[in-house]
Image (spheres, helix red, strand yellow):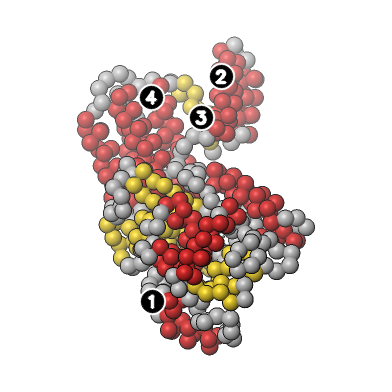
Amino acid sequence: MKLYNTLTRKKEEFVPLEEGKVKMYVCGPTVYNYIHIGNARPYVVFDTVRRYFEYKGYDVTYIQNFTDVDDKIINKANEENTTMEVISGRYIEECFKDADGLNVKRASHHPRVTEEMDHIIEMIETLIENGAAYENDGTVYFDTKAFPEYGKLSKKNLDELIAGASERVSFDEAKKNSTDFVLWKPFKPGEPKWQSPWGEGRPGWHIECSVMAKRYLGDTIDIHAGGEDLIFPHHENEIAQSEAANKKPFAKYWLHNGFITVDNEKMSKSLGNFFTVREISEEFPYEVIRFFILNGHYRMPLNFSRDLMQACKNGLERIKNCRNDLGYYLNNAPEGNADEAVLAEISKFRAQFEEAMDDDFNTADAVTAIYELVRYTNIKIKENISKATAEEIAKMFDLLCSVLGLLEAKEEADEDTALIEELIAKRAEAKKNKDFATADAIRDELAAMGITIKDTRQGVQWFRS
Ligand code: AMP
Ligand code: ZN
């Protein structure tokens, strides 16, 4: 299994630190708004990475934080005349709703900055003791010159960075070097604050991830991931903090997703060219959003458009209809042994799927393998295959789809399905009693719900259109 490591700029074979285990940290959102389609990309992509590791038999510990202290949250609280806790609490909840809709599994832990303050202070103290940080008038800075490897992830040269920064901005006299960054800052009136050895204040952004990764995964972790905009400075600074504090390598593999773009520009809150997951979910089901994200390779840019969403919707429909047909076929399939030739054929689709995923999680090619399985299944169910054979196809279908987090039944869907099946049963009853007016009325009612029905020899089949 190969993955592209931003640290080495190469595809490398994955070798876990501890056999059979994967320790993975993914930077989470700052909670002051609904997540947009761009933010959904790391959610879906790294959830799929996790699922693939699990499919391969690894025990994955997956940590994703919530940044619940930040200027943007404080500003939003001031705008609404409420507290930071109310804002962050609200958007954490909304974020979970979207993540659940996208079928993103919950992390092993979702730590929050406000709950980790003692550990944050502890790590800053260690950095000062180790000579990698210094205090100036209530502010603690990381001393980038004290970490000679600074720049190793983003491939930036520290001296060039320092020269560049001093040309661009006026030099902050409180810092030793223009590249030094804040670990702790003193509070301003009206802001939330915590007691620390350097006075009342709050932490800078980067330190939280170093602390949470250490707390929940240990000093050295297998995989650290996030969007590519985090490579510099956020991840570069995390490496500096963690390695200067723990004196051990921080993360073995660094994975970064490319951007979701709109008209080839990064989708972002600051540019205002964003669509929230919530608003798009009103036009297209959540699972189509997930499928759209998986239709590109995670490191490549992916341009968001409604045309592409529609194409993804149609593609997913094809997969779902095929699985439904297979389900109906199974209800009345003839008994008999599993056909070895068919089993051999479907295991080729699995091999094709794995080959794609083993090559740096190429979900786009993995989807192609599923489409080929669909094509094959559509042919086979017209050939009177045995129930045992059809069951094997169904198992393969469900297995591959579940690695991508697709076609997994949800409670809501079940409720919906129950209603549809009840209406279909009523219609059958009406037809039996030659009450065709009622039967037609039920058909119209189903059509209004977007359900098409087809009378077949095996009974009534239905499809979502
Ligand atoms: P933020 O809330 O801006 O810190 O972003 C949360 C996560 O979403 C980070 O991992 C970002 O790298 C990622 N992200 C933000 N915008 C985009 C985008 N347009 N495309 C892909 N990932 C993004
Ligand atoms: Zn982070």
The one nearer the camera, 248 or 366, is 248
Which numbered disc flags the more N-terminal residue, 2 or 3?
2
Which label sits in the foreground, 2 or 1? 1
Distance between the alpha carbons at the discs numbered 2 and 1: 72 Å
- Residue 349: where, in percent of width, then height? 29, 42
The residue to which callout 2 is attached is 425
Q: Residue at x 54, y 30 (%)?
A: 414
Q: Give the image location of residue 400, x and y in percent.
A: 36, 41
Looking at the rendered structure, the secondary structure element under dot 1 is: loop
Counting residues from the N terminus, which is met first, the one under dot 2 or under dot 1?
A: 1
Name the N-terminal-most of marks 1 and 3.
1
**CA gap, disc 2 and disc 3:** 12 Å
Q: Nearer the viewer, residue 152 or 311?
A: 152
Q: Mark 4 highlights which residue? A: 330
Using the rendered image of the protein, determine whether residue 278 is visible from the camera's viewpoint.
Answer: no
Amino acid under label 1? Pro
Residue at 69% in and 56% down? 84
CA gap, disc 3 to disc 4?
15 Å
Compare marks 1 and 4 and give the one earlier in the sequence. Answer: 1
Q: Looking at the rendered structure, which numbered label has been put on residue 148?
A: 1
Closer to viewer: mark 1 or mark 4: 1
Q: Amino acid at mark 2?
A: Ala
Label 4 environment density (alpha carbons within 10 Å; few <14, some 14–19, many ≥20): many
Of all residues shown, which one is farthest toward the top? Answer: 433
Nearest the eye: 211 or 390? 211
